[in-house]
Image: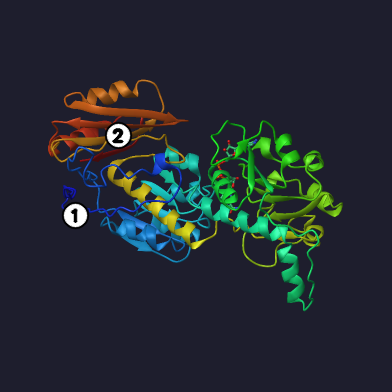
Amino acid sequence: MSATQARDIEGARRVSYSLSFSNSPTMSFHSPPAGSLGANLSGRALKQLTPFNSQNIKILLLENVNQTGRDILTAQGYQVEALKTSLPEAELIEKIRDIHVIGIRSKTKLSQNVLREAKNLLVIGCFCIGTNQVDLDYAAKQGIAVFNSPFANSRSVAELVIAEIIALARQLCDRSMEIHRGFWNKVSQNCWEIRGKTLGIVGYGHIGSQLSVLAEAMGMKVIYYDIVSLMAMGIARQVPTLDALLEEADFVTLHVPDLPETRNMISHAQFSKMKTGSYLINASRGTVVDIPALIEAMSSGKIAGAALDVYPNEPAANGEYFNNNLNQWGEQLRALNNLILTPHIGGSTEEAQRAIGVEVGEALVRYINEGTTLGSVNLPEASLRSLTSDEPDHARVIYIHHNVPGVLRKVNAILGNHNVDKQISDSKGETAYLMADISDVKVEDLKEISEQLDALSSRILTRILY
Ligand SMILES: NC(=O)c1ccc[n+]([C@@H]2O[C@H](COP(=O)([O-])OP(=O)(O)OC[C@H]3O[C@@H](n4cnc5c(N)ncnc54)[C@H](O)[C@@H]3O)[C@@H](O)[C@H]2O)c1
């Protein structure tokens, strides 16, 4: 059953939606966008909502956003301009004045200076993991939602770690470097199969749990330590303390976030607990391992090998930057044997980029068409069940406002003459987000509601979808 055509009071935009699923494990946030399947479970045709009182949605995509994301947005009929690079600040300011949506990756800085000029901007899509290139607080205060894709690359990281476990156990990288230099060195001493060895996973989240499954499939025993109690995948076993894990594991792999409690989580005391001849892998955050302590543990033979994908300081661009100027121990580290050093590539695969394109593209469509903020990093997360086509005189009112007392009462007084079928309101810091579906409403009424809401002193942004 196809979704009903969008009604657009300016007659400009017609939307149709082709659904594709993200492969991210965070199902709650990736369930099919309500209203996008064309029908709900009861078989009723869902109504595609469309913004009231807005021109065609204009989107600027920078930094060569993946084709999957571009396709999702153009399929909606939005006006999409895609550029391969970032833009210098002056050009960005010029362009951002006119657009409703911007898609960026990590190089475009959306500072207060830039966002101040973004008078029409509704939403920012960060087609990447991090969001520190955006002034999130300022964006929230302007009612601009920000979405990203934090978990689309979990599988890529887990696969890299599997490769590293075998490579370390077989001293693969050293043998390869030797033969690159013309040196034949056929040895079996201290080279091992991974079958039957114990993998200790610290942090059993998106990556840690994927890795658990892969490692067991390769015949490893898996134990894990996490600050919360988590159900094991397969026959993995949670251990009560980090020390218990370090004492038992042949391979220790770190998958925790960068938090004050995880800084230097693995230092001298932890290396001393680890088995002699064991291995350490860090593809989480560079601050988690005390690198001088690792250098000492490897030099003494306590640790037989390590793989690092992340560092306390990482260069901003590709080039010959990994030296002592960046991290004072750089040279000592590079001199160690059986140490795999990679430039933060854990999540860098074509699949991850595609999944990011789908995840962020879909989040943008949901936000533009339905006002759903699930997954937003700077606005409260709010969602309402979709309207259906047998609810013809319904509209969705979205009111982003300052989080001050008395707003709900004033908003409901304005909506009062219409039946409020469903409503949700939530706040995050100084910003609050309200959605209400109202019935018995005519197009003529919408303008009046919009103007009355705009006149409230608490208003940041009003949107009406119908
Ligand atoms: N190398 C890369 O390219 C790359 C790519 C993606 C993610 N990462 C990093 O990998 C790490 C894990 O990512 P994720 O997506 O699995 O995160 P996640 O949030 O899904 O899982 C993190 C887990 O760590 C646990 N945890 C938090 N503090 C802990 C502590 N003190 N001790 C033990 N467990 C603790 C949490 O309870 C959670 O289960 C993050 O640091 C992330 O930034 C790196």
Query: Given the image, on which type of amino acid does mark 1 rest?
Result: Ala
Q: Secondary structure at mark 1?
A: loop
Q: Which residue is mark 1?
A: 12
Query: Does any portion of residue 107 appear in the rendered image?
Result: yes
Q: Residues within 10 Å of mark 1 (few under 14, many from 20)?
A: few
Picture coordinates of residue 376 (x, y %)?
43, 41
Q: Residue furthest bottom?
A: 182
Is label 1 within 8 A of ligand 1 (CB to nearest ligand atom)? no
Which is nearer the N-term, disc 1 or disc 2? 1
Q: Amino acid at mark 2?
A: Leu
Quadrant (top left/top right/bottom left/bottom right) for the C terminus: top left
Query: Circle 2 sits on which residue?
Result: 384
Viewer-closest of 160 and 314: 160
Q: How is the image coloured?
A: rainbow
Tell me the distance, in whole angstroms, between the alpha carbons under discs 1 and 2: 26 Å
Q: Are marks 1 and 2 in contact (CB under 8 Å)?
A: no
Residue drawn at x 53%, y 58% as measured from the top left: 107
Where is residue 147? Give x, y as percent. Answer: 43, 46
